[in-house]
Amino acid sequence: MLRELHISNYILIDDLDLDFTKGLTVITGESGAGKSIIINAIRFCLGAKASKDVIRDKEKKAKFEIVFETDDIFVITREIFPTSRSIYRLNGDIINSNKIQEITENLIDLYSQRDHNDLLNPKKQVEYIDNYLGNEIIEVLSKIKEISDKRKKIIEELYELKNEELDIEKIKNSYEEISKLNINVVNDQNLDAEYNKLININEIEMQINSTKDMLVNSSDLLNKCSLNIENIKEYDDYFIDINNRIESLYYEVKDVYEELSYYDIEETDSIYLAEIEQRTSELDYLKKKYQKNIKELYNYNLELEEKIEKHFNKGENIKKLEKEIKDIESIYDGYSKKLAELRLKSFNSFKKDLISILNDISIKNAKFKLNINFDDNHNYRYSGAYNLEILISINNMDYKPLKDTASGGELSRIMLALKTIFSKNNKNSTIIFDEIDVGISGKSAFEVGKKIKNISREHQVIAITHLPQLVCFADSHLLVDKESTTVSVTYLKEDKHINRLAFMMSSNISKKSIETAKELILKANKE
C-alpha cells in the first residue's frame, strides 16, 4: 500500500508531506484547488512524462517521493532539474524510468477521466476480457505469438533462398580445398606443438642430460649439508627443522632426476617429421587464406556444405518452406479461433456481473454483446485474427459501440462496474480514482460510493471526488485548498469531516445540513 507522498517545489506546492492509510481515502476540494496536482505527483514517481514547467522555483529542482509497503519497503524518488533532466532513485540507488514502471506495474492502478477513452477503444476492451479469464487466455496468446514468430522466421528464410545470389563455383572450390585436408580439430590443434617438439628433440635431450648432471651434483652437496647439520643439532633444537628441510630438498632433487630419466627421447623419424611439416604448412596456408583458426575452418566448411546442398535442392527446399508456411498458418487460424471462443466465454462470464452492478447504479435495462469479426488484414498478429468490440443496448435500443451510445456519466459507471469486477483478481494493492464520478448524481451516486467502498475492503483506494455520497464512506478525508499561489492539505476528522460533507451537500454549513451529513454517514456505515 501507499504509505507516504513527499512533494517539494512543484507548481503550487513548496513542501508537502502526506501519510496514507488502509481502506478508502477521499480527497476533496473546490474546482481548481489543486487536487489533481497530488495525483500527478504520484504519476511522476511512476514514470509519467514531466518537463521543467512543473518546477515552482526555477532555480531549484522539484522532488517527488512515494513510500510503498508490500513485503518490502520501496522508496521511489524522482528529481526534476531546471534543465528538464530527471533522475529516478529506488531506495536511494539511481535507476532508469523503464525499471521504475516495471517495478510499480502491479503496485498502483491509477484511473482518471482521460481513461474513458480506453473504454471506447476495442483493443482496450479486449484487454479487459483477457484479464478476466486470465491464464487460460494467456496460454493461447503465448502460443499464437510463438506460431507468428515461427512463421515470420520461415518467410525470411524463404525470401533469402529465393533471392540469394551465390557464386556456387567459388563455394564448391573452397569446400573441396578445405575438405581435402579432412580436418580433425583436436589432433590438428595439437600439431604445432608436436612439430615443435620433434624438430627440437636433440636440444631437449642435451638439456635434460645437462640438468641431470647438475642434479647429481646438487644431491651430493645436499647430502654433505645434511651431515654437517646432523653433527650440531644436538646442541640446539633449532637445527632439527633446518635438517628436515635439507632432507626434503634432497629427496625432491632425487625425484626430479628420476622423472627426467623417464622422459622418452625417441629417435626422430624423418618421414613422420616431413609429413607433419607438410600438413602444418597446408593448414597454415588455409588459415591465412580464410582468416580462420582450425576450429573456425572446420565449421566454415560445414556451412559451405550446407549452402551447396541447399543450392542443388533449391526448388525442393522452396516447396518445403512454402508447405511449412501453409501448415503453420493453418495452425495459427485454429488457435485464433480458439482465442475468439475463449474471449466470448470470458465476456459472457463477466457480462452478468456487469449488468447487475450497472442496474444498482442506475443504468437500467442495459444489455451487452460481443461483436466478433474475422479480420482479413490480420497479418498474423499476436492478438489473433479476429476483431472484437463490446456493443451496448440501453432501454431496448439497437446494439451500438460504446462510443456511439454512452454518455460521460454512463462511461464512468461502466468503468466503475468493470473495476469492481476486476478488483477481485487485481494484483495492485492500491487503486486510485481521479474523479471517476464525473457525470454521476442522484440515486446512483450512493451506489457508486458503496461499490468503491467495497473495493477498498480488499485494496487501498484513494479517490478524488466531488460526490458527497462517496465521501460519506471515507475512512480518511483530505481537504485540498488553495490560497493565492500555494496549495495546502488538511486531514479532516470527525466534526471537520462532517462539516465538509455538509458543505458539499448544500454549499453551506447549517444545523440542518450537518444533521443530513450525519444521517448519510450513518447510512453508509450500515452498508
Image (spheres, helix red, strand yellow):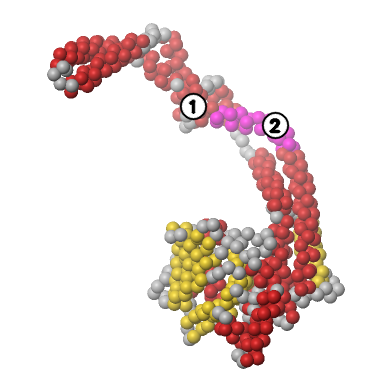
In the rendered image, residue 181 lying in the magenta stretch gets the answer no
Label 2 residue SS: loop
Q: Which residue was labeled with disc 1?
A: 294
Q: In which quadrant is the C terminus drawn?
A: bottom right
Task: Tell me the residue that label 2 is attached to.
Answer: 313
**x and y percent of residue 290 in the render?**
49, 31
- The total of numbered circles placed on residues is 2
Disc 2 marks which amino acid?
Asn
- Which class describes the residues within 10 Å of circle 1: few (<14), some (14-19), or many (20+)? some
* Amino acid bearing label 1: Ile
The answer to whether residue 61 is left or right of residue 310 is left
Q: In the depicted view, which residue is nearer to us: 346 or 353?
A: 353
Q: Residue at x 78, y 51 (%)?
A: 338
The residue shown at (55%, 59%) is 70
Which residue is painted at 45% across and 63% down in the image?
87
Foreground residue, 267 or 94?
94
Place residue 193 in its image quadrant.
top left
Residue 29 drawn above or below residue 100? below
